[in-house]
Image (cartoon, grey):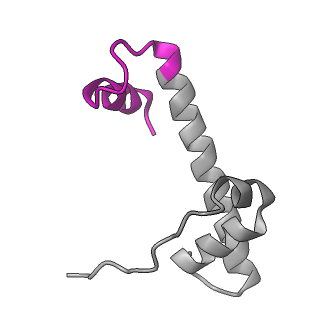
Amino acid sequence: MSVSLVARTLRDGHYVQRPTCSASVLLAATLQFLTATVLELAYREARYRSRRRITPELLEQAFLHNALFRTLLGTTTISHAVPDRP
């Protein structure tokens, strides 16, 4: 996720009046770290279950098996609906 995209989203979404450069950099780095961590956990769960693709079910299992994410997302429901393909 690029810093300029985060800065533009913060500004255009009216989340802050005047975002600083450091706020955009910090938020972009945090989002990148969380995304990488979630994908790594889901990859390990898929490999453990001998699956080739990461599915919403595997994401949910990865969250449930990780103590930090379990406390952070304890009451969150991950949708199991798959969008229609054209």
Can residue 55 be seen here? The reply is no
| Position of residue 41 measured from the top left corner of the image (x, y, whole percent) | 70, 64
Locate the N terminus and report the quarter of the image it occupies.
top left
- 12 displayed left or right of 75: left
* Magenta residues (range): 1-23
Q: Residue furthest front?
A: 75
| Position of residue 15 measured from the top left corner of the image (x, y, whole percent) | 36, 27
Q: Is residue 59 magenta?
A: no
How many callouts does the rendering have? 0
Which residue appears at 66% of the width and 69% of the height? 43
| Position of residue 72 measured from the top left corner of the image (x, y, whole percent) | 67, 52
- 3 displayed left or right of 70: left
Which residue appears at 19% of the width and 81% of the height? 86
71 w.r.t. 55: above or below:
above
Q: Is residue 10 magenta?
A: yes
Can residue 77 be seen here? The reply is yes
Q: Nearer the viewer, residue 32 or 81?
A: 81
- 84 displayed left or right of 44: left
Dividing the picture into quarters, in which one does residue 13 lie?
Answer: top left
12 w.r.t. 60: above or below:
above
58 w.r.t. 71: above or below:
below
| Position of residue 42 measured from the top left corner of the image (x, y, whole percent) | 65, 68
Which residue appears at 33% of the width and 32% of the height? 9
